[in-house]
Image (spheres, rainbow, N blue to C red):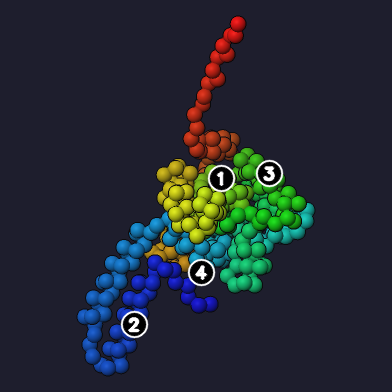
């Protein structure tokens, strides 16, 4: 697969190519070009720091969608010493857009669920582009019920542009499947850690997104709708998605300010796809820290805290009804 270069990364790539050309020229000609190479490397490091420390919200959306970004199974391979996948919802079919199974992370036996995209066209068709059907949410719920039964914490990886909106999915109860998961996860008697590893859109994300701790990787987004969808509604023009992303405030930093995200997990400079092994190790360390914390809280207290956590989200004002005036 050809390397994907985002527009704002082009100056960095061009400078990297220039450094490689200088090295090749130095090797072939025997002329010492090390001073010029070192100057270019200093310039490159400054450019990288400047570029990735000042990303717009839309640029972070682009990084969250990068086709080389690690997906759920990429993290499973790097984080888990054991993973036994379960299939099917015991009602209709097995949804390949959702993976679920019994996993082991160091000394912790957990249930891991997550949305899974593909990289090639064939893989994306197989995974339905990471957009779950109702069977995927019911499979996830089946896995979570196993977690409760066997006292295993749940780890949920979110990465979807939304639940699949096809007619068949609606006929088989897409909305009910998501709503049922929200209800069951709110009261599930085992710790739940939710991690947004890429995109988190609408009910498709929320269907596996209720937890005791909500973590977002640095270059991810989480919202009720995609920027393109919002732009189509507000501006009647999906090409205004960058403008919509700014207005929506959908990045990890925004979610932390809104007190929805409990922690932002730093990514390697340039994004998780630049160094998947480093990203996986960082994520593993964070997960282990929260597993230690949450497994020590009595389960009744944990469920109460979870419900209270979601009750505090958002802002509202209680308006007292005006007293009725007597009419003559």
Check disc 2 and report the residue beneath it. Answer: 20
Q: Position of residue 121 (x, y in %)?
A: 62, 72
Residue in front for this viewpoint, 281 or 62: 62
Check the image and report above or below for 2 versus 25.
above
Q: Position of residue 122 (x, y in %)?
A: 64, 72
2 or 3: tag closer to the N-terminus: 2
Check disc 4 and report the residue beneath it. Answer: 68
Foreground disc of the pair 4, 1: 4
Q: Crowding at label 1, few (<14), some or many (≥20) Cα neighbours within 10 Å?
A: many
State the separation of the CA atoms marked 2 and 3. Answer: 55 Å
State the separation of the CA atoms marked 2 and 4. Answer: 23 Å
1 or 3: tag closer to the N-terminus: 3
Secondary structure at numbered mark 1: loop
Secondary structure at numbered mark 4: loop
State the separation of the CA atoms marked 4 and 3. Answer: 33 Å
Residue in front for this viewpoint, 226 or 271: 226
4 or 3: tag closer to the N-terminus: 4
Check disc 3 and report the residue beneath it. Answer: 180
Q: Position of residue 256 (x, y in %)?
A: 43, 46
Farthest-out residue, right: 91
Q: Position of residue 93 (x, y in %)?
A: 75, 59
């Amino acid at each position: 697969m050809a390397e994907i270069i985002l527009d704002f990364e082009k100056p960095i790539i061009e400078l990297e190519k220039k450094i490689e050309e200088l090295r090749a020229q130095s090797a072939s000609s025997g002329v010492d070009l090390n001073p010029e190479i070192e100057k270019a490397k200093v310039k490159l490091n400054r450019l990288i720091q400047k570029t990735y420390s000042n990303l717009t919200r839309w640029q972070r959306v682009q990084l969250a969608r990068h086709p080389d970004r690690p997906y759920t199974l990429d993290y499973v391979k790097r984080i888990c010493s054991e993973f036994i996948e379960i299939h099917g919802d015991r009602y209709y079919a097995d949804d390949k857009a959702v993976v679920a199974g019994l996993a082991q992370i160091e000394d912790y036996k957990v249930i891991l669920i997550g949305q899974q995209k593909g990289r090639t066209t064939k893989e994306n068709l197989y995974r339905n582009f990471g957009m779950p059907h109702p069977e995927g949410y019911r499979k996830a719920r089946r896995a979570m019920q196993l977690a409760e039964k066997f006292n295993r914490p749940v780890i949920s990886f979110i990465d979807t542009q939304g639940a699949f909106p096809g007619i068949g999915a609606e006929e088989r109860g897409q909305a009910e499947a998501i709503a049922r998961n929200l209800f069951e996860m709110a009261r599930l008697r085992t710790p739940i850690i939710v991690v947004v590893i890429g995109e988190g859109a609408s009910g498709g994300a929320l269907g596996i997104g209720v937890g005791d701790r909500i973590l977002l990787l640095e270059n991810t987004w989480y919202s009720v709708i995609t920027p393109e969808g919002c732009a189509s509604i507000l501006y009647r023009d999906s090409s205004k998605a960058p403008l919509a992303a700014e207005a929506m405030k959908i990045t990890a930093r925004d979610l932390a300010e809104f007190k929805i995200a409990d922690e932002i997990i730093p990514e390697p400079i340039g994004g998780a796809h630049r160094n998947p092994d480093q990203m996986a190790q960082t994520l593993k360390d964070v997960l282990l820290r929260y597993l230690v914390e949450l497994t020590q809280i009595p389960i009744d207290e944990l469920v109460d805290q979870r419900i209270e956590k979601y009750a505090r989200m958002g802002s509202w004002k209680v308006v007292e009804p005006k007293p009725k005036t007597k009419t003559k």
